[in-house]
């Protein structure tokens, strides 16, 4: 599919699929990369609807490194467990060393 034919959610998924293993980004960073800087909430809606699309939604958190989308994952702590399985340390829903693990698509792509 050509990029210009993708809808916003599909574009979000394409960016999210590029987040490296063991790294995280924010809803706002994806929105900014897609030229829709004020659409962080829409990126969140896209992540919520990403089930079954092979999108690593667990790697997308809020701008402070908080697991604000965790209630959209099956099970109580699945988002945290997925992150921890990649070596990301999470304490009280907060990613530790967030600045070090942060992946900015604007700079990286």
Image: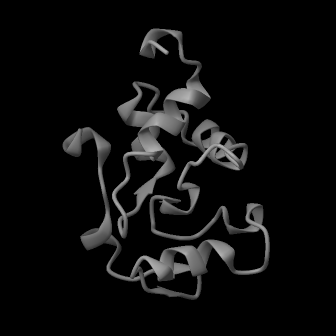
Q: Is residue 17 left or right of residue 55?
A: left
Coordinates of residue 14 in the picture (x, y in percent): 46, 35
**How far from the left and from the top, in percent, is residue 41?**
62, 42
What residue is shown at x 57% (from left), y 24% (from top)? 8
Residue 33, given in percent of the width and then of the height, sits at 36, 34
Q: Residue furthest right?
A: 75
What residue is at 46 percent from the left and 69 percent from the top?
65
Report the colour scheme: one colour
Q: Position of residue 23 (x, y in %)?
A: 35, 65
Q: Residue furthest left?
A: 107
Q: Quadrant of residue 81?
A: bottom right
Q: How many marks?
A: 0
Quadrant housing residue 93: bottom right
Q: Image check: 102 left or right of 71?
A: left
Q: Nearer the viewer, residue 29 or 14?
A: 14
| Quadrant of the frame with the C terminus | top left
Identify the residue shown where x is 58% and y is 88%.
92
Quarter of the image holding residue 80?
bottom right
User: Where 91 falls versus 64 (above or below)?
Assistant: below
Residue located at (75% from left, 61% from top) = 72
26 versus 29 height, above or below: below
């Amino acid at each position: 599919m050509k990029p210009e034919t993708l809808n916003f959610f599909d574009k979000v998924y394409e960016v999210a699929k590029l987040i490296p293993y063991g790294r995280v980004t924010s809803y706002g960073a994806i929105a900014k990369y897609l030229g829709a800087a004020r659409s962080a909430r829409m990126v969140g809606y896209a992540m919520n609807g990403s089930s079954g699309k092979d999108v690593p939604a667990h790697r997308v958190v809020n701008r402070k490194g908080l697991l604000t989308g965790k209630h959209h994952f099956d099970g109580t702590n699945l988002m945290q467990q997925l992150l921890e399985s990649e070596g990301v340390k999470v304490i009280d829903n907060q990613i530790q060393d967030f600045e070090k693990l942060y992946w900015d698509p604007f700079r990286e792509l």
